[in-house]
Image: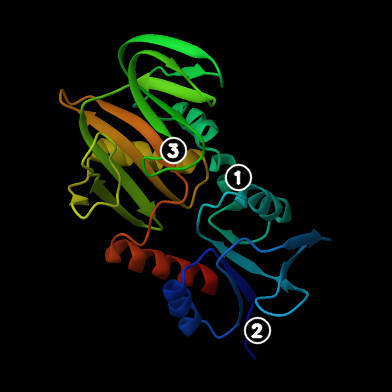
């Protein structure tokens, strides 16, 4: 008799939930937002999808970035059970600036960065970008020249003219995506963003960082300058998988295979 695990899908959108549900004969708890959990005696308990109470969970698939997800990921890491992506790696990479600092120890394409404490003032003589917070997709960034006072703890780095690209890895599938936008802020979301030929150096760099940080999926953003020099800008621990159908399909195949193993 086949025994099926109870899996939890957290943050997965309705469409992806339906695909996974149709291919899995076992029990599923599905939450689009962060659920309550308890870890006791090595067992993960999660609130029911409907009704009152909690149920033990054998495997967790998590996808998303929420304001309040750090404690949830911490609980998954303490549990230490099967989680996709790896909960400890997500914990290490959830905070954007600390994750970037870790990645700078492994990338071939680092550059010196500065730091400004909240409320501090800085004077710069070159085009500079400040970044703060834990959101991606062009959020929490400011470009300036001369004097600037930061309301937040922020990194500062030179602004590089060039082509913004993302190397994305999900399972054994890899892509390079040209990031687009009408301003200097580039992201994966504009309709003009598209797949492009993979740069082997950027792919090797991304794979090295992925292995070093024990990540199951990754999206690294780089700038290739007008002179061909390459710079790592940002590491996405939960890269967007719904923008392109090819990526979405690969993600679902990866997750369903992981659940079945």
Q: Is residue 83 above or below residue 100?
A: below
Calculate the distance from the C-alpha at mark 3 to the C-alpha at mark 2: 37 Å
Local packing at callout 1 (Cα closer than 10 Å; few below 14, some 14-19, many 20+) is: many
Q: Position of residue 85 (x, y in %)?
A: 53, 56
Image quadrant containing the N terminus: bottom right
SS at mark 1 in the image: helix
**Colour mapping used in the image:** rainbow
Q: Which residue is mark 1?
A: 91
**Left or right of 41, for residue 49:** left
Say which quadrant the C terminus sits in: bottom right
Upstream in sequence: badge 2 or badge 1: 2
Instruction: Say which residue appears at 57% left-offset and 53% top-offset.
Output: 86
Badge 2 marks a residue whose secondary structure is: loop
* Residue 261 visible in the shown view: no
Q: Give the foreground label among 3 and 1.
A: 1
Viewer-proximal residue among 98 and 189: 189
Q: Are marks 2 and 1 in contact (CB under 8 Å)?
A: no
Between 84 and 1, which is closer to the camera in this rendering?
84
Dot 3 corresponds to which residue?
209
Residue 238, above or below 152:
below
Expressed as whole percent of the image width and height from the top left, the position of residue 65 reads: 51, 52
Q: How many marks?
A: 3
Name the secondary structure under disc 3. helix
**Distance from Cα at disc 2 to Cα at disc 1:** 31 Å
Instruction: Specify few, some or many for label 3: CA neighbours under 10 Å numbering under 14, 14-19, or 20 or more.
Output: many
In the foreground, 218 or 34 = 34
Residue at the spot 72% in from the left edge and 80% down from the top edge: 51
Q: Position of residue 105 (x, y in %)?
A: 47, 26
Q: Which mark is residue 3?
A: 2
């Amino acid at each position: 008799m086949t025994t099926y695990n109870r899996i939890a899908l957290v943050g997965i959108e309705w469409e992806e939930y339906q695909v996974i549900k149709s291919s899995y004969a076992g029990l599923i708890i599905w939450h689009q937002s962060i659920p309550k959990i308890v870890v006791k005696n090595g067992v993960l308990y999660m609130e029911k999808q409907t009704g009152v109470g909690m149920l033990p969970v054998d495997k967790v698939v998590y996808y998303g970035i929420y304001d309040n997800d750090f404690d949830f990921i911490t609980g998954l890491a303490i549990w230490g059970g099967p989680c996709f992506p790896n909960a400890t790696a997500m914990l290490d990479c959830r905070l954007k600036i600390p994750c970037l600092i870790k990645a700078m120890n492994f990338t071939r394409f680092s550059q010196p960065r500065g730091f400004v404490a909240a409320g501090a003032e800085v004077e710069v003589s070159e085009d500079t970008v400040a970044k703060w917070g834990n959101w991606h997709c062009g959020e929490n960034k400011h470009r300036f020249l001369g004097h600037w006072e930061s309301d937040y703890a922020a990194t500062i780095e030179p602004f590089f003219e060039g082509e913004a690209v993302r190397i994305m890895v999900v399972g054994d599938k890899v892509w390079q995506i040209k990031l687009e936008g009408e301003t200097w802020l580039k992201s994966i979301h504009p309709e003009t963003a598209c797949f492009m030929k993979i740069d082997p150096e950027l792919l090797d760099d991304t794979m090295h960082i992925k292995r070093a940080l024990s990540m199951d999926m990754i999206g690294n953003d780089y700038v290739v300058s007008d002179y061909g020099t390459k710079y790592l800008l940002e590491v996405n621990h939960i890269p967007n998988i719904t923008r392109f159908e090819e990526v979405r399909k690969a993600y679902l195949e990866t997750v369903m295979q992981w659940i079945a193993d």
